Image (spheres, helix red, strand yellow):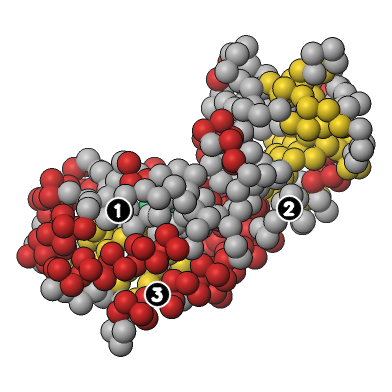
């Protein structure tokens, strides 16, 4: 009963994120953890955004889909991010409410006519993506050929498995079609640019080289001097099974390749990371509800229908994790592999790989997952009556290991 009161007071009385703790261990010690707790570090988010703003050789946007939380958008806008990649009119609304002057890039390559019209009229959006003749015609018919509209032609290359999620299976014109589309966009009176997405959590900087070289070929074939080139998201965050080199390596690779390909007339560059900016700013505190010692089964109060979905899609994306007890990190030499289930009654609600945990892990211990800020809370459901989460602010983020 005491537990229930404590949790509900956090959720209802205090606005989300109002409680400020030094770090997640301090938060874990003061919270009952009846519901899972998201620990948000605005400082970490701003620092990560600044790594992009200071290092990327062009304009930095943020892909809202990774984490559309109002606090995230607020902190990024304050850090100087003025461009937001949006995929829906709901995302436009989320950005416009906080930052009415932000530039919106509607880079979802498939939009309904009414979504295009709403973006144009209600949100002042002047940037639309297309990867087909059909979509380009739809945009032209919906907004007319009024000047000032930019069309980002999305192209793709055959996948080389350098990323966790391959976007080329769903979006992107091949080089031949992209060259046709760019010419057609000009005929419609639009300002054309090229864009690509090398795949999310793309750990190989050479993927950008392949795409920038292709952009050069497409522009040549179309006979057009590219004014702008959007090099996508895809920059990595840090997970137990996946990490890339330092961000600076990506920025240098991109800058060098653009000058090699485009020489004296390089296009202005843009990027639109989601994961790499948002992931390290959040960790998730989950609580052990039950340990079946004999079979090494462990039940948490959150799982794949909550903040931990992505690990089941790509097991390399299992977050770094640690065990907290009474606000202290439990370091044990004696460890055991546990099968970790979530709180719902669905048998699929289980982590894809066992977690190595102290063998005396017990009820009420906290298991903290790092780097949950991208595609964690954004995809959480309330399936089976779970999914509510408490939210606190921490000064220092737990990010696990690696250079995130
Ligand atoms: C999802 C998405 C992004 C962000 O991708 P990350 O891998 O999270 O950086 C950027 N641009 C577009 C068009 C997207 O759909």
* Residue 243 in the figure: left or right of residue 286: left
Identify the residue at the far bottom of this view.
264
The quarter in which the C terminus is drawn is bottom right
The quarter in which the N terminus is drawn is top right
Which one is nearer the viewer's eye here, 188 or 358? 358
> Is residue 222 placed above or below 68 in the rendered structure?
below
Q: Does dot 2 land on a helix, a strand or a loop?
A: loop
Residue receiving disc 3: 257
User: Residue 156, labelled with which disc?
Assistant: 1
State yes or no: Cβ of the residue under disc 2 lies below 8 Å from any atom of ligand 1.
no
User: Residue 298, labelled with which disc?
Assistant: none
> Is residue 50 placed above or below 375 in the rendered structure?
below
Please give the name of the residue rendered at 74% of the width and 49% of the height, measured from the top-left corner: 400
> In the image, residue 200 lies at what x, y percent?
47, 49
Q: Quadrant location of residue 339?
A: top right
Pointer 2 with pointer 1, Cβ within 8 A: no
Q: CA distance from mark 1 to mark 3?
A: 18 Å
Please give the name of the residue rendered at 77% of the width and 56% of the height, measured from the top-left corner: 396
């Amino acid at each position: 009963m005491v537990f229930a009161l404590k949790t509900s007071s956090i959720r209802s009385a205090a606005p989300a994120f109002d409680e400020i703790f030094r770090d997640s261990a301090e938060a874990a010690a003061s919270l009952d953890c009846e519901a899972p707790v998201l620990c948000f570090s605005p400082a970490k988010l701003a620092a990560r955004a600044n790594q992009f703003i200071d290092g990327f050789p062009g304009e930095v946007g943020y892909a809202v889909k990774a984490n559309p939380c109002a606090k995230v958008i607020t902190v990024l806008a304050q850090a100087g991010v003025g461009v937001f990649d949006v995929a829906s009119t709901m995302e436009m609304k989320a950005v416009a409410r906080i930052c009415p002057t932000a530039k919106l890039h509607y880079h979802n390559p498939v939009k309904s006519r009414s979504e295009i019209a709403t973006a144009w009229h209600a949100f002042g959006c002047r940037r639309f993506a297309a990867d087909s003749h059909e979509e380009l015609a739809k945009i032209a018919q919906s907004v007319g050929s009024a000047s000032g509209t930019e069309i980002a032609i999305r192209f793709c290359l055959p996948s080389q498995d350098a990323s966790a999620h391959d976007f080329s299976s769903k979006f992107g014109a091949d080089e031949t079609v992209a060259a046709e589309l760019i010419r057609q966009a000009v005929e419609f009176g639009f300002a054309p640019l090229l864009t690509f997405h090398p795949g999310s959590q793309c750990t190989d900087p050479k993927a950008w080289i392949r795409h920038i070289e292709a952009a050069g070929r497409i522009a040549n074939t179309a006979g057009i001097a590219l004014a702008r080139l959007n090099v996508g998201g895809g920059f990595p965050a840090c997970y137990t099974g996946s990490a890339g080199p330092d961000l600076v390596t990506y920025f240098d690779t991109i800058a060098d390749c653009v000058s090699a390909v485009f020489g004296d007339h390089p296009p202005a560059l843009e990027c639109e990371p989601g994961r790499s900016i948002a992931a390290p700013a959040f960790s998730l505190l989950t609580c052990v509800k039950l340990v079946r010692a004999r079979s090494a089964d462990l039940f948490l109060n959150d799982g794949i229908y909550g903040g931990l979905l992505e690990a089941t899609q790509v097991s390399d994306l299992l977050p770094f994790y640690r065990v907290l007890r009474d606000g202290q990190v439990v370091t044990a030499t004696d460890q055991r592999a546990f099968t970790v289930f979530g709180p719902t009654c669905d048998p699929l609600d289980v982590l894809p790989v066992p977690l190595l945990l102290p063998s005396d892990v017990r009820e009420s211990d906290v298991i903290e997952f790092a780097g949950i800020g991208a595609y964690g809370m954004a995809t959480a459901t309330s399936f089976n009556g779970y999914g509510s989460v408490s939210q606190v602010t921490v000064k220092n983020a737990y990010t696990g290991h690696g250079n995130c």
